Image: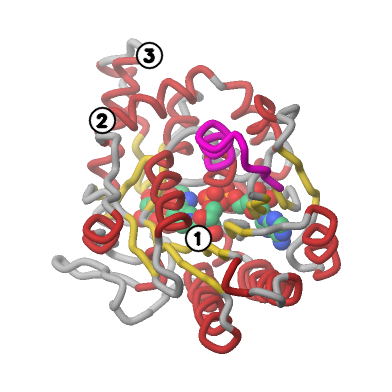
Amino acid sequence: MILMITGGAGFIGSNLILYWLKKYPEDHIINFDSLTYAGNLSNLSSVEKHPHYHFVNGNLCVPEEISSAFEEHRVEAVIHLAAESHVDRSIAGPGQFIQTNVVGTFNLLEAAKEHWRENLAKHRFHHVSTDEVYGSLGETGFFSETTPYSPNSPYSASKASSDHLVRAYRHTFGLNVTTTNCSNNYGPFQFPEKLLPLLIKNCLEQKPIPVYGDGSNIRDWLYVTDHCSAIDTVFHHGKEGETYNIGGLNEWSNIDIIHFVCRLLDEALGRSGKDSCENLISFVKDRPGHDRRYAIDASKIQKELNWRPSFTFEQGIRETISWYLDHQDWVRLVSSGEYQKYYKQQYGSK
Ligand code: NAD
Ligand code: TYD
């Protein structure tokens, strides 16, 4: 199979490509990515010479670039991850989120419809989305596949729009689509603008850990490899036209997860007392429109497709911490240049 993975140089995309080439070495992977600040080919250095891996520097906002990749590589299936993915950036500058996440997804669907027109049912188009499309939960309850969409940030609104477009291309044109909506991921190669890698980076550099509001917002955390195995499961066995929620039944308030990771970091770095990472915790102004709680009901994918996460949270966090400790060069590489400007704008310090 010739599989195009969009956004393959980003956090989840690069984990997915490494996972896929190991599990399905006979498949051909076309990594279609425009290498924004979030895309780093060094994530894939271990497979760059793999005979079944091919990188295309292409932009979803330029329809001709998608079309020529489909033609040149005879793409047979798509897993679509490319997106602008950070909520804070969508607040500072929503325009690019509409371009990439909405218009870019539309362009990709159009290319698939055009290039696969002889047999649309034969080619799977899997769309990777987020639980944030469902909005915010109160103290109780979970997001299920039938929870009404209620996005609150420009990021989640743009992802919700892309989900609707994917749905419409199946309903109207018969494209063979599946969609997954996943909770917060963590793991290797995550850009240090997101909470956990930012926390690890700042602890290493003895910089304040910015906690938005009172730190009581809740997220449901899943190790990235478990997200990859869920995408794999739905791509191969998911029912055409269906959506599946993915989550780890692993809810943490931000402040609790920060304390937990600080304790593990103290252990790894031999810090204690006044040097403890916990002393770096610093409460800052809340994010505008900050969603209170996300929690996933993943019973559909569990019951229908027999998928379950295989990492415990402690295992996943320990793996993640040791990966960041072993890859400080990677952190330095991705956080030079543009990142410095972003950090100053977002947190008012260097
Ligand atoms: P990321 O920001 O790390 O990577 C995004 C990738 O897309 C980058 O490589 C970037 O270069 C590429 N890209 C951006 N704009 C592009 C364009 N116009 N054309 C081509 N490539 C472009 O994102 P991520 O965290 O890996 O998320 C991947 C997908 O998973 C996204 O669709 C996101 O909404 C979804 N998701 C993420 C999480 C999470 O916790 N990170 C959770 C659930 C769902
Ligand atoms: P983030 O990693 O940006 O993911 P998302 O907003 O998509 O859930 O943030 C996770 C949680 O951590 C969210 O409630 C916001 C909070 N947060 C902070 O408190 N401080 C920070 O510096 C960041 C980036 C996030």
In this orientation, does residue 184 appear? yes
**Few, some or many residues within 10 Å of mark 2 (<14, 14–19, 20+):** few
Amino acid type of the residue that numbered disc 2 sits on in the rendered structure: Glu
> Where's residue 301, x and y in %?
29, 59
Q: Is residue 27 magenta?
A: yes
Q: Quadrant of ligand 1?
A: bottom right
Q: Label 1 sits on what residue type?
A: Val
Query: Which residue is pictured at 60% across the width and 65% down the height?
Result: 123
Q: Residue at x 55, y 67 (%)?
A: 91
Q: Label 1: which residue?
A: 128
Single out the residue that lies furthest toward the left. 140
Local secondary structure at mark 1 = strand
Residue drawn at (34%, 56%) of the image: 246
Confirm or reject: label 1 Cβ below 8 Å from ligand 1: yes
Quarter of the image for the C terminus: give it.
top right
Q: Position of residue 64 (x, y in %)?
A: 85, 68
Quote the CA–CA distance across marks 3 and 1. 36 Å
Q: Nearer the viewer, residue 205 or 282?
A: 205
* Viewer-side label of 2, 1: 1
The residue positioned 40% from the left and 68% from the top of the image is 239
**Which label belongs to residue 269?**
3
* Magenta segment includes 170: no
Q: Could you tell me the amino acid type at mark 3?
A: Leu
Front: mark 2 or 3 = 2
Q: Which residue in the structure is indicated by mark 2?
A: 314
| Residue contact between numbered discs 3 and 1, judged by CB atoms under 8 Å | no
Q: Which residues are magenta?
A: 16-30
In-image side of 114 versus 91 (left or right): right
Give the answer, above or below, for where 74 lies relative to 172: above
Q: Dot 3, how many residues are within 10 Å of its Cα: few (below 14), some (14-19), or many (20+)?
A: some
C-alpha distance separating marks 2 and 1: 25 Å
